Image (cartoon, rainbow, N blue to C red):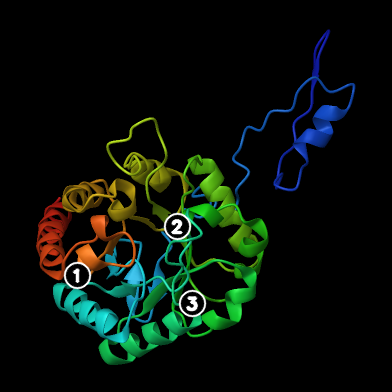
Amino acid sequence: MSAGSRTTILGLIGDTSVIDEEMLESLEFVESVKRIQEPYKNANRKFHPKDTVIDVGGVKIGGGNFAVIAGPCSVESKEQLCTVAEAVKASGAGLMRGGAFKPRTSPYAFQGLRGDGIELLLEAKKETGLPIVTEIMDISHLPLFENVDVIQVGARNMQNFELLKQLGKTDKPVLLKRGLANTLQELLMSAEYIMAGGNEKVILCERGIRTFETATRNTLDLSAVPLLKSMTHLPIIVDPSHATGIARLVKPMAVAATAAGADGLIIEVHNDPPHAACDGAQSLTPEAFDELMKSVGKIRNCLEEG
């Protein structure tokens, strides 16, 4: 406590994450409440200085380990999925992505194959050995994700706190995407919801934020990578596909994200982008993905050489 002639300052130390700042500010004798330490404890690098490494079926992410997740925006058929899975594996991808549940702006757009899509993902996993990553939309869908390797929380659900709480009770890695208009602290607070429930396997994803710029789908905030590295011990990957929305921009942004220090990438790849059920404009062909992987590999070599 510091008592002055007109003002008395009270300082709280220890774990203040449960303090209700708004309640304290509502007291008539309190002029203001200021937090001098971040409210996220589990995700905070100050309390966990060593990088967290997430192991997904033998594929490691974080702590110097770099992993690429690749596959179609949405699961359309077994043939499509297995064709893409074989191709991205051959190019060096460590995990396969594919949307079974698709959050779409229009209710008339393709919404995904849902449970059937997850079954197709599991079939592709059997054929290729690649761990699978797919997005959850609602708590009620959780039983369908029993055999999914990484559960993705999309940008629209980043602050679906009830969903985050339930995912905190699972033992599965969670890929948490930054919201369209959310700050880095808000992203980390969402990660905190998952970790507070006991699940420390959280992978953060920068996927672009909404700005006044309309030339790209979103604005990729690559400054988030080194900033998050200083704020948290959790691994950070980048999604240049959703960030730009334009296939020809994916490779340069993937290379830039790698140079910025990202722990991995998530890339959309389709065997026939012009006829994709969704997001064909931002999807790479397997050939283009192979070229991207070669360029990313060169950047990784440069970083390792110092």
Instruction: Work out whether residue 273 or residue 176 is closer to the camera in this orientation and state it.
Output: 273
Residue on which the image places disc 1: 272
Residue on which the image places disc 3: 114
Q: Is residue 216 above or below residue 80?
A: above
* First-in-chain label (2 vs 3): 3
Measured as percent of width and height from the top left, residue 209 is found at: 41, 41
Measured as percent of width and height from the top left, residue 280 is found at: 26, 60
Asked if one can make out residue 169 in the rendered structure from this viewpoint, the answer is: no
* First-in-chain label (3 vs 1): 3
Location of the N terminus by quadrant is: top right
Give SS at disc 1: loop
Residue 234's disc is: 2
Q: How far is disc 1 from disc 2 in space, using C-alphas?
A: 35 Å
Q: Is residue 18 above or below residue 110?
A: above
**Residue drawn at x 48%, y 55% as measured from the top left:** 106
Residue 243's disc is: none
Disc 3 marks a residue whose amino acid type is: Arg
Q: In the rendered structure, are the residues bearing label 3 and label 1 in contact, judged by CB atoms less than 8 Å apart?
A: no
Q: Residue furthest right?
A: 28
The part of the image, by quadrant, that contains residue 86 is bottom left
Q: Residues within 10 Å of mark 3 (few under 14, many from 20)?
A: some
Q: Residues within 10 Å of mark 1 (few under 14, many from 20)?
A: some
Of tags 1 and 2, the one toward the viewer is 1
Q: In the rendered structure, are the residues bearing label 1 and label 2 in contact, judged by CB atoms less than 8 Å apart?
A: no
Q: How many marks?
A: 3
Disc 2 marks a residue whose amino acid type is: Leu
Disc 1 marks a residue whose amino acid type is: Asp
Give SS at disc 3: loop
Give SS at disc 2: loop
Q: How far is disc 2 from disc 3 in space, using C-alphas?
A: 29 Å
